[in-house]
Image (cartoon, grey):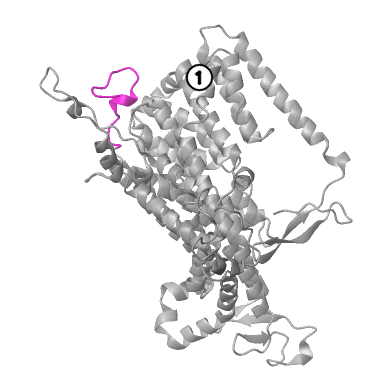
Amino acid sequence: VVSTQSTGDSRAPSLVPITEGAALITVRSFSTTPKSHYTLMPQWRTVFTLAVLFLSCAVAMSLPVEEKRGRAACVILATALLWMTEAIPLMITGMLPAVMFPLVGIMDTKEVCSKYFNYVSMLMMGTFLIAESVEACGLHRRIALKILSIVGRGEALLMLGASTCTWILSMFMSNTATTAMMLPIVDAIIKSLREISNTVGNDHVLKVRLNSGGSEDDSNHKQSTKVDIVRADGTRLDSKQFTWFCKGLLLSVPYGASIGGIATLTGTPPNLVLKSIFEASFKGVNSIDFQKWMSVALPLSCILIIFGWTLLCIIYARSSYWNLITLRIFWDKSGRNKEITKWKHVNRTIRKQYSRLGALRFPEIVLLFMSAALVFLWLFRKLDSVKGWADLHADVFHTPSNTTNNGTSEEEEEKVKVYLEDAWVVIALSLFLFIIPNENPFRGSCSRSSALPEGESFKRSRRLLDIDTVMRRTPWDVLFILGGGYAIAAGCKDSGLSAWIGEQFSFLYNSSRVVIALVVSSFVAVLTEFASNTASTTLLLPVLISLSEAIRVHPLYLMMTGTLSASLAFCLPSATGPNALVFAFKEIRVIDMIRTGIIMNVISIIITVGATSTWMFSMLDLQEYPCWADPNITCPGAP
């Protein structure tokens, strides 16, 4: 998004238009610096990386052979430093445990390498494939424009529409990809509003008041007159207020993306990191699946998106928000008509972009059906009160066991093995993306005659998804970061480092679990402002497991708190991909993000801890410390 073209003066930023979709975005562009000014930075990164690797290996090799936990700590500390500083790419840092654990005698090569790709990796890979196909055909853009055309009739409602669109799409797509798709649409709306702001004397759109003492529509004061926009309710909207509203509208997009990722298990990588580390640490224990995660996290996500929209409206569109919550635009007929007239031009712009997409095409219909089928199969795979479709499938292949010596059957002692998990659903559906053609095979001539929407990146390949698109768009670095987390969790457990960390937190045994959860949530939220949320979650979850053992609290309680808090990064552009993308727009400054982000972070932390301590605490059965989580005792009936 940020261009680096040189402009004459190497120190001055320039504004370069970048085409994205059907809209034209004007973003910050900082020109390249002469080589003599920045060649030292890669050298310092090299020196720092080599120093960290050499010192960690030297210290680890100097420790006694029986001191495995100290050597494991050296490897984890080196990985953490390189992850947080990003001295080398995160993907390469994720492979560091595979090199250093065998070198310092923690795990053998076969064992550590086997941790890098497992069930959760397949689940994430299948999600990537579905999301890439949706992006390729432009279905996500059609959904977003449709929602905006329905709700975008005022400053507050327009912010609600932008945040809601991003929130819904980011539940099933990459947060960064969703933000990159939504920002061009929002930018087109802002440009449409600027056209309205520059319209003078048009009674059908807005009235214009001249502040230099002349009457309305007086052309003699054009050179020295400041033009203010007059709203339908008579209040003025000057250029400063308009810029203020644009900031709120742009910030609603990354807020919706970050909050939407919380709602589903596959919404953001930290959620899958929790699932993978939990299963690696407590083998055989039923982990949290898509249906259970959504049942507890979706209400939290709804509360956060409502609060985020309210906060942005209060700061950036207070009068419009007040008219909305008092229902003035509904009971005041004249005011409502003026408000609708005011936003007629904006709705026309949205409808124009939507009309460019044309009729619903065959790839979009297929992917809409597949996305709905994916969610349906995930939600009803396994149910509490009745058998899900995966349980019915397991019954087909289950062979009743004979009666044992104590008079009970093995079927009663052992649960029926379920063969079909969440990863199977998404991988099975992903295979059809490479089989189904991207043109209607029954109406080929009609499909060929329909024009592609302007600006869309969808190419007419032979299938819905081709391997070139997969190799180019798949975020492979996330898979390696996830694999590095598996290796770190296994190394902590095998070396005894997890048990040692748990002993150090034993003094917190009598402390309030809510206070500890607040501290954990605050620490994770601050850490993810400066480091990757996936890397931060990968490093901290094994520590939180040890902490839960020390204070005798269910491991999922602190793990859920830390994982959900990793998505609460609203202050800095470097915190998340969505924040970095919106910062590229010239309307947004760092101080704007910090001003709103601090309030959003603090209240979100309180809401998240409240959620994990109330309905999540009850729905996930976190009241007691489970026996299977204690390594010192044998749990009856535990796997």
Front in this rendered view, residue 173 or 377: 377
Q: Quadrant of the N terminus?
A: bottom right
Q: Residue at x 26, y 42 (%)?
A: 392
Label 1, on which residue?
Answer: 111
> In the visual, does 335 lie left or right of 43?
left
Q: Residue at x 27, y 40 (%)?
A: 391
Q: Residue 416: horizontal and vertical position, in percent?
A: 25, 32
Task: Point out the stretch of residues depicted in magenta.
Answer: 622-639
Query: Which corner quadrant of the image does residue 236 belong to?
Result: bottom right
Q: Residue 276: horizontal and vertical position, in percent?
A: 44, 33
Q: Residue 34: horizontal and vertical position, in percent?
A: 87, 44
Q: Up-down: is 397 above or below 362?
A: above
Q: Is residue 599 visible?
A: no
Q: Is residue 236 visible?
A: yes
Q: Main secondary structure of the magenta part?
A: loop
Q: Amino acid at mark 1?
A: Glu
Q: Up-down: is 476 above or below 453?
A: above
Front in this rendered view, residue 432 or 174: 432
Residue 293 is covered by the magenta coloring: no
